[in-house]
Image (spheres, rainbow, N blue to C red):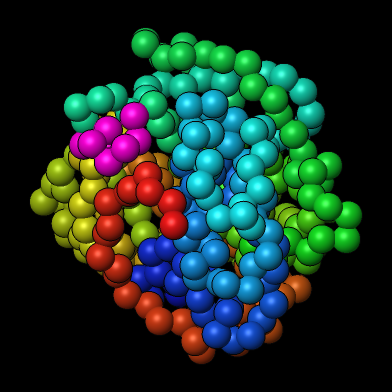
Amino acid sequence: MNELLSALKVSCFTNLLEAYCEARIEITAVIDGGAGWGETAHRMLQACPQIRTCYAFEPFPGNYRFFESADARIVLHRQALANRNGVVKFEVPSVVQEGSAWGARGLVGYSSGGSLKVMGRPGALTIDVECVRADDVVAPGETIGFIKLDLQGGEADALDGMSALLGEVEFLWVEYLGDPALCDKLSELGFMLFDTKYVFRGEPSPDALEAFDVAYTTTASTGDFRWHGYKKQRWSNFKEEFIFCKKRFNLIQTDIVAVNKRKLKNFTKALSFLEPGVPTYNPPSAVMK
């Protein structure tokens, strides 16, 4: 795992999209896998105005209403990205309730934690959703320049369903929860991997503060308190260190930037326009503009 972007404190795909745009590297179509209520799709368009189409995949019906006033360039697909087409079970552990902090922002009924992995969690809602391969949805001849995957563990299957698209993609932003097979798959597909910031549940312990710099804190849609930070030391074995931090510090995830090795020249060019740093966290709003 290359630690360059973590060292530069890259915290969001917008940092990189802005750099690619400044470098005049053409990205005109993107995929938002696990689009939630549309915030990430809008961030893509704001960071890179040259984008003409954002294919937004979101299978949870409770999130659809937030796209009613979305930018016309965002094309909502009410499906889950996967390695096959068909109907499967989808588990939603919780939704935003009235009276909560996120509910006060207009996000009642929203959920960010739905998964194709049904674990039978107490109180969870299980529904039928349609799955689709991205290769079967994207318009023929369309070049996808960027892909974001936040699928609660379904990222590897989604990659299997978009093999035809990956050859020309510049880079991906992929949620990593600790499955080493995901890193292996991305590497096998011809991508160079970079870690970014790390997200933890609860308050940081003294040991955690010795290992990580705290960037900012948030409250998730579930009500969980979380802190976000960057490594202070290099890791000799990314997979093993990640599992250790999950057990020791309540680590939840990092986001992996997977850069197409065939496009490394473009990535190097974009790096010269990258403006690193930790942005001020802005709480979500359901207002689409």
Question: Does residue 105 belong to the magenta stretch?
Answer: yes
Residue 1, given in percent of the width and then of the height, sits at: 52, 63
Residue at coordinates 46% horizontally, 82% vertically from top-left? 274
> Is residue 251 inside the magenta stretch?
no
Q: Nearer the viewer, residue 191 or 115?
A: 115
The magenta segment = 101-108
Residue 100 shows in the view: yes
Image x and y of residue 227, in percent: 23, 50
- Residue lying farthest right? 140
In the image, residue 284 sits, relative to residue 22, either above or below, namely above
- Residue furthest to the left: 206
Assign the C terminus to one quadrant of the image.
bottom left
Residue at (28, 45) in percent of width and height: 200
Q: Is residue 141 left or right of residue 115?
A: right
Residue at screen point 64% across, 57% down:
73
Front-most of residues 148 and 53: 53
Front one among 280 and 163: 280
Residue 68 at x, y percent in the picture: 53, 41
